[in-house]
Amino acid sequence: MSTGARWTIDELVELVGTALSRGYGGATSGRVRDLPDRRAVRWYTTIGLVDRPGAMRGRTALYGTRQLRQLVAIKRRQAAGRTLAQIQAELAGATDDTLREVAAVPDDLLAGGETAQPAPARARFWVEPPAPPTDGAVHGVRLPDGLLLVLPPGASAPGPDDLAAVRAAAAPLVEELAARGLLPGAPPSPPTDTDQPDRPGGS
């Protein structure tokens, strides 16, 4: 069990990204996420690759340095081409010394000990609203489930044929968002990539 836990799951994910910003080229397989998300963290905990939260603040789970190193170590091994089964064999129940060596979390990230704070989040272009064009007009296409596709600044206003074509082309995206529970009222689906353990006969 981790001691001295101080980070929420969102802060932990941010810290993993910061730790991997040095000397990490990303996962070699297109089926593996470069960085874990909340659902992946919970999945790794379920299969024993990441320790359970070390403490609770009310109903909020808190994580510590060991879980940070576990997550970074998993991603470094995936970047080296290891399968999840191989990583489980190596890292499940690994000692702190082993995790420290494999994860290679920068010392300055943990300079403040367990109370180290995640670095400021990098700009997220997919949620930041675009700058309006010089004439002040911003055009968009309304999609199902309350989604709005905003066109680049300076784009022409779409006509009826444009709207129909864009909505048809965006239908798979809307379905994927709904399947992942990223739309209001849509329940999340279980992970489907190789963040799950290898199964006989699987690809």
Image: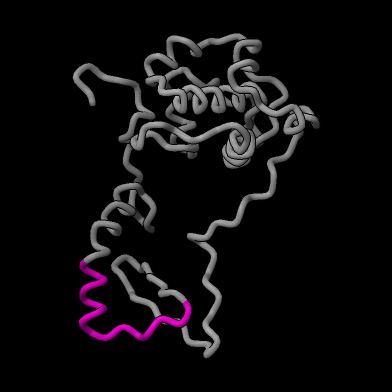
Q: Is residue 109 left or right of residue 53?
A: right
Residue 121 on image: x %, y %: 63, 50
Q: Nearer the viewer, residue 9 or 197?
A: 197
On the image, which quarter does residue 83 sit in?
top left
Residue drawn at the location 44% of the way across and 25% of the way down: 78
Compare residues 7 and 101 and report the one nearer the observer.
101
Left or right: 190, with 33 as reference point: left
156 is higher (above) or lower (below) than 12: below
147 up-or-down from 191: above or below: below
In the rendered image, residue 107, in percent from the top left (x then y), is placed at: 75, 27
The quarter in which the N terminus is drawn is: top right
Residue at 60% across, 22% down = 103
* 162 in magenta: yes
- Residue 53 shows in the view: yes
Query: Which scheme is used to colour this image of the protein?
Result: one colour
Up-down: is 131 above or below 108?
below
Give residue 12's position: percent from left, percent from top.
61, 36
- Quadrant of the frame with the C terminus: top left
Magenta-highlighted residues? 153-168
Which quadrant of the view contains residue 202?
Answer: top left
- Quadrant assignment, res 131: bottom right
Residue found at the very far bottom of the displayed protein: 135
Count of residue discs: 0
Q: Is residue 95 left or right of residue 107?
A: left
Q: Residue furthest right?
A: 112
User: Who's the residue at 34% across and 35% down the image?
Assistant: 31
The verdict on residue 83 being magenta is no
Residue 60 seen: no
Residue 106: image location, x then y, percent: 70, 29
What residue lies at 48% left-to-right and 60% top-to-bottom?
A: 126
